[in-house]
Image: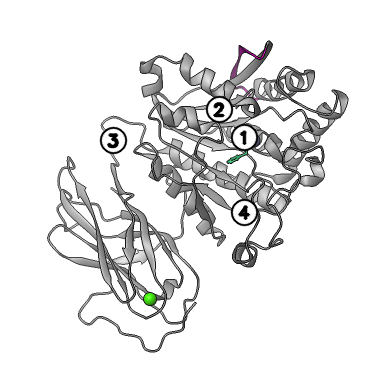
Amino acid sequence: MSRYSFLTIAAGVALTGAVLVAPMATASQAAPDIPVANVQAHLNEFQTIATNNGGNRAHGRPGYQASVNYVKGKLDAAGWTTSVKSFTYNGATGYNLIADWPGGNPEAILMAGAHLDSVTAGPGINDNGTGSAALLEVALQISATNFAPEKHIRFGWWGAEELGLIGSTNYVNSLSSTEKAKIDGYLNFDMIGSPNPAYFVYSASGQPAGSLELQQTLERYFASINVPTELTSVGGRSDHAAFARAGIPISGTFTGAEVTKTSAQAQKWGGTAGQAFDPCYHRSCDRTSNVNATALDRHSDAMAYSIWTLAGTGGGNPDPDPRFENGTDVAIADLATVESPITVTGVTGNAPADLRVDVSILHTYRGDLQIDVVAPDGTAYRVKNSSSSDSADNVIASYTVDASSETANGTWKLRVRDVASQDVGRIDSWALQF
Ligand code: DPN
Ligand code: ZN
Ligand code: CA
């Protein structure tokens, strides 16, 4: 990181019209804090199931069936509509557990999922008891809070992920194109309590249009608790892949598997540099002791925040709150001013007084950056000033702009000026939420 040699403030730019808001759920009901002790209690059950069934919860083994029964029993008691869908793989019957929360717009479905199977080598508590247990607890909290979202919520616990994403692929392939088109997005949670944890969010880059909103919603949660994230491209390594192939927007979170933590990552996230995020990945030692409770807690809360936020709004048609996004990277060279455009069409009248601007800029010294949102007529709204003392990385934030005097339709721009030498970065993505 660099220090400033001098600081320049652009003259004549009004500092009014924009305020930084704390990230919050836009739904009428705020997401609850997921009690990590409840998630851990589900993990203890998975451990007991494995211990009583030959040490694992793998496809075709009794520990998998017992895991399905445990999750299904809790969901049924909480008022979810469940169905167990079987498939055959490797000469054994496998199961997906699908759970629907009654209500919401059946034409606008938000899905989230986690694989419930382990490898045969061990009980699979971090991989993927953690995603499965957190998703179960979020489901129980949806019930406990009587969440009444605009969208319909459906969760999936997948079988035979470890044998090549078999269950989730079977599920997506079983849907008609009409049924697929109703799914607005899919969030995946596979390994969210690694003992030497990372805070990864699945990158929208190269994924179906609409994935950026999911990515940015997850990023916004971690920004709100001041935990830095990194984007990761998980490619075809987990159950989002079949959804992405079907053109459904995807994202998710991940605390890392066999890859080694760098010293830069250890500095910002704690833990041990030079050691795998999960040294027990796919081993018999992936037991309840192989979970970092803080990471599990934060990723469970991120899961709840994103589900409440994404399911809470936008279910109507026509969309009363359209969103426009640009996910094309724009490099920010040293001392440069760069712009990224978004063309807004189909919105009648003026922009709202609470136009939300979601920004994801990756940079090595955020204090270098001065950011304006430029309306179609050229009016610039300052959302962030530069500051020589603001030494953190990245600008991942939501700003609210009073744009009520601006015509909504036309080309808007995010204008980013790097005012000090040495540190550089890029606009990763930004969006306008009307
Ligand atoms: N799905 C796990 C595996 O491939 O073994 C772990 C994993 C999850 C890897 C998410 C990458 C991303
Ligand atoms: Zn996994
Ligand atoms: Ca710079």
The type of residue carrying mark 4 is Ala
Q: Which residues are magenta?
A: 78-90
Find the distance from the CA under tag 1 to the CA under tag 4. 19 Å
> Residue at point 56% right, 47% down?
302
In the image, the residue with mark 3 has its CB under 8 Å from the nearest atom of ligand 1: no
Q: Earlier in the sequence, mark 1 or mark 4?
A: 1
Q: Are marks 2 and 1 in contact (CB under 8 Å)?
A: yes
Query: Residue 32's spot in the image, x, y percent?
Result: 59, 44
- Name the secondary structure under disc 4: loop
Q: Are marks 1 and 3 in contact (CB under 8 Å)?
A: no
Find the distance from the CA under tag 4 to the CA under tag 2. 24 Å
Location of residue 380 (image quadrant): bottom left
> Residue at point 56% right, 34% down?
238
Label 4, residues with CA under 10 Å away: few <14, some 14-19, many ≥20: many
Location of residue 44 (image quadrant): top right
Location of residue 269 (image quadrant): bottom right
Nearer the viewer's eye, disc 4 or disc 2? 4
Q: Which mark is residue 225?
A: none
Q: Earlier in the sequence, mark 4 or mark 2?
A: 2
Residue at label 1?
Answer: 135
Q: Which mark is residue 198?
A: 4
Find the distance from the CA under tag 2 to the CA under tag 1. 8 Å
Q: Are marks 4 and 2 in contact (CB under 8 Å)?
A: no
248 up-or-down from 391: above or below: above
Residue at label 3?
Answer: 319
Q: Which mark is residue 155?
A: 2
- Name the secondary structure under disc 2: strand
Label 2, residues with CA under 10 Å away: few <14, some 14-19, many ≥20: many
